[in-house]
Image (tube, rainbow, N blue to C red):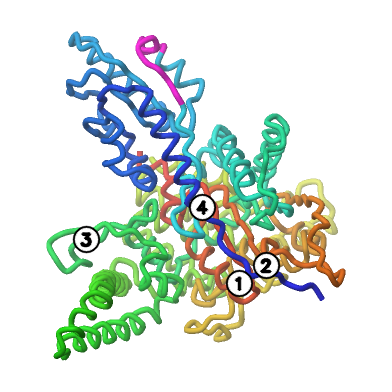
């Protein structure tokens, strides 16, 4: 039996922030004089995570503006832009520069493209007649540590760009982020991939390493396993309503770059509050992965403890005891009180919203029935009712896609009826949205059986195949991997099954695959499962050093063998992070999550809903 030397620990990802900060400072100092900084609004929150306003001021930034319109009336002699390489941004920048030129204002301009400039940016600037007036540089924004175990590129547009538009430009950034991680924390010996995008990224990682030469990586690797997972491999999980506290916070308030904006209805005052949600907030750390039904009781118990702490302070008589109380306990009590106030308000808001607009329990019941493949007639009726009630389009599209994905497409009549009904209710501007959904395989029609020139036996075979196809793929995956536990089996208070993140109705497919691959040491023992997956798989293993042998000759398992990095390409949900944290607790693994962005059903559908434009 292998001996374990030490316990798995989180690598120190603060070095990523430091490197990004130093890179930004270097770029800011490239214009030594005072300059105005114009920032793409989508980059405001990510920039907050690596550099505050004070750092920008120290390095010559005079005023900060959002890149929002064609005109910018400011008088500084130098201007720096920080923007993503999009047509809209480049045109806005070009129009602002032309506006300055028309008014006789001569300035020095520099554009920092995040994560890198693309060829079309230069072409567009040239077409607009301002290419000669600007300097262009890349700000290679790497993974941002949103928490001790969550890293993000903060590129929410990647899902649409790659899986809908076929845009590959960000793959280089993803591959570079993996190369950088390996140069900082050692070569990752075991790599498992799920999806075409994952394979392209890994091939690019190997190409970059061969071009750069083998870097001087640390002798001891800190991460033992890397999973690269396409969001396309599991589209059901993000469409389901999350039922953990953190998941519902994201669904209700929209967590961005780790920050959550709470309005007066939560704060209990006339002001809003922006709160950073991470493990440093002990109250949040304790409740983030709990099922929502057991959060309020915990918060109530904590509130009583804080009240007891304050009462203890009031009863102190000795001046020395009072001084000691103020120095040691009062600060913690105040912090806990502030945190409790916000989380109790947020929890109340979530529970109150359950009964408004869409009945929360009825919505959940419909989702759970679709996952189990039962009461489909009632589910169909419920969806039609929501369309008639003019429920927001994204919420209905979420249910339509869940219906299609769990049934392997819809019969022609149902497919056409629901689409027509939706378009009549919400407008034919959504035709492009349905085109995107078909391209992704999220809303599809079951192929019809052609009976022309077929024998009776052929027709029977085709009909049997069609009937089987209705139940294959998703239904068979659920059965083989036990994705849907039997009713009443899951303990939501003290969960021992990953399906608790969806109230015991469904285990995220991605998480179950990670569990199975780790248990079997690869995809080899999962042939009956991989053939049902909508995407290809791959694995790569590097030879282990022989230095890890103990004096008794037995091979010692390095702590890094229990550290697993799961990289989601196209977005990761808080339901998946909670499920894998539970798996790590049960199996002794330390999971780290990297992603192009945090996502949920609303964000996923919103990114491909062209009816909004």
Sooner in the amino-acid sequence: mark 4 or mark 2:
4
Look at mark 4 in the image and give the residue it sits on: 13
Look at mark 1 in the image and give the residue it sits on: 583
- Where residue 481 sits: x, y (%)? 69, 70
Residue 455 is left or right of residue 58, and the answer is right
Sooner in the amino-acid sequence: mark 3 or mark 2:
3
Q: Is residue 461 above or below residue 372?
A: above
Q: Is residue 4 above or below residue 62?
A: below
Sooner in the amino-acid sequence: mark 3 or mark 1:
3
Q: State the separation of the CA atoms marked 3 and 4.
A: 31 Å
Residue 200 is left or right of residue 580, and the answer is right
Sooner in the amino-acid sequence: mark 2 or mark 1:
2
Q: Which numbered tag is attached to residue 170? A: none
Q: Is residue 508 magenta?
A: no
Structural crowding at the residue carrying mark 1, measured as other residues with C-alpha within 10 Å and reported as few (<14), some (14–19) or many (≥20): many
Circle 4 SS class: loop
In this view, the residue in front, 50 or 219, is: 219
- Where residue 192 sits: x, y (%)? 71, 53
Q: State the separation of the CA atoms marked 2 and 1.
A: 8 Å
Circle 3 SS class: loop
Structural crowding at the residue carrying mark 3, measured as other residues with C-alpha within 10 Å and reported as few (<14), some (14–19) or many (≥20): some
| Residue stretch rendered in magenta on the structure | 126-137
């Amino acid at each position: 039996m292998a001996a374990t030397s030490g316990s798995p620990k989180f690598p120190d990802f603060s070095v990523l922030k430091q490197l990004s900060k130093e890179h930004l400072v270097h770029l800011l100092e490239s214009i030594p004089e005072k300059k105005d900084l114009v920032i793409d609004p989508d980059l405001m929150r990510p920039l907050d995570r690596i550099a505050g306003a004070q750092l920008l001021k120290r390095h010559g930034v005079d005023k900060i503006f959002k890149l929002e319109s064609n005109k910018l009336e400011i008088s500084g002699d130098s201007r720096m832009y920080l923007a993503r390489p999009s047509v809209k941004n480049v045109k806005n920048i070009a129009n602002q520069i032309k506006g300055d030129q028309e008014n006789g204002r001569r300035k020095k301009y520099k554009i920092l493209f995040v994560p890198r400039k693309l060829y079309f940016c230069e072409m567009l600037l040239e077409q607009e007649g301002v290419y000669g007036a600007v300097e262009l540089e890349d700000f290679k924004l790497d993974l941002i540590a949103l928490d001790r175990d969550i890293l993000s590129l903060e590129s929410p547009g990647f899902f649409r760009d790659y899986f809908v538009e076929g845009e590959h430009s960000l793959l280089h950034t993803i591959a570079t982020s993996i190369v950088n991680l390996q140069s900082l924390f050692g070569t990752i010996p075991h790599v498992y991939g799920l999806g075409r995008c994952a394979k392209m990224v890994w091939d690019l990682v190997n190409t970059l390493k061969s071009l750069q030469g083998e870097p001087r990586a640390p002798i001891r690797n800190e991460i033992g396993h890397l999973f690269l997972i396409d969001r396309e491999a599991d589209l059901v999980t993000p469409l389901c309503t999350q039922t953990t506290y953190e998941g519902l916070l994201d669904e209700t308030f929209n967590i961005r770059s780790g920050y959550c904006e709470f309005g007066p209805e939560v704060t209990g005052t006339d002001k809003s509050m922006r709160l950073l949600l991470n493990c440093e907030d002990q109250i949040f750390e304790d409740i983030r992965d709990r099922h929502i039904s057991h959060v309020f009781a915990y918060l109530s118990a904590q509130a009583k403890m804080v009240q007891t702490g304050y009462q203890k302070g009031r009863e102190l008589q000795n001046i020395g005891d009072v001084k000691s109380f103020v120095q040691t306990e009062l600060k913690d009590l105040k912090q806990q009180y502030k945190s409790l106030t916000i989380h109790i308000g947020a929890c109340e808001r979530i529970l109150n919203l359950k009964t408004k607009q869409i009945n929360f329990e009825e919505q959940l019941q419909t989702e759970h029935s679709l996952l189990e493949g039962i009461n489909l007639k009632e589910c169909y009726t419920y969806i039609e009712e929501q369309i008639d009630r003019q429920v927001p389009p994204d919420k209905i599209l979420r249910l339509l896609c869940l219906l299609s994905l769990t049934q392997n497409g819809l019969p022609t009549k149902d497919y056409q009826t629901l689409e027509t009904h939706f378009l009549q209710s919400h407008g034919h501007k959504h035709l492009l949205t349905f085109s995107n959904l078909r391209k992704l395989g999220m809303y599809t029609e079951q192929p019809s059986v052609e009976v022309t020139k077929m024998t009776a036996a052929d027709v029977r075979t085709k009909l049997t195949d069609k009937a089987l196809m209705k139940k294959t793929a998703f239904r068979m995956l659920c059965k083989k991997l036990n994705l849907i536990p039997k009713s009443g089996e899951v303990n939501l208070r003290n969960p021992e099954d990953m399906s608790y993140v969806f109230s015991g109705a469904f285990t995220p497919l991605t998480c179950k695959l990670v569990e199975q691959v780790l248990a079997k040491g690869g995809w080899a023992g999962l042939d009956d499962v991989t053939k049902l997956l909508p995407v290809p798989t791959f694995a790569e293993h590097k030879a282990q050093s022989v230095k890890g042998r103990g004096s008794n000759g037995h091979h010692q398992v390095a702590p890094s063998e229990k550290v697993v990095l799961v990289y989601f390409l196209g977005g990761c949900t808080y339901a998946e992070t909670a499920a894998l944290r539970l798996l790590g607790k049960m199996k002794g693994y330390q999971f780290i999550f990297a992603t192009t962005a945090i996502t949920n059903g609303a964000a996923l559908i919103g990114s491909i809903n062209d009816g909004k434009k």
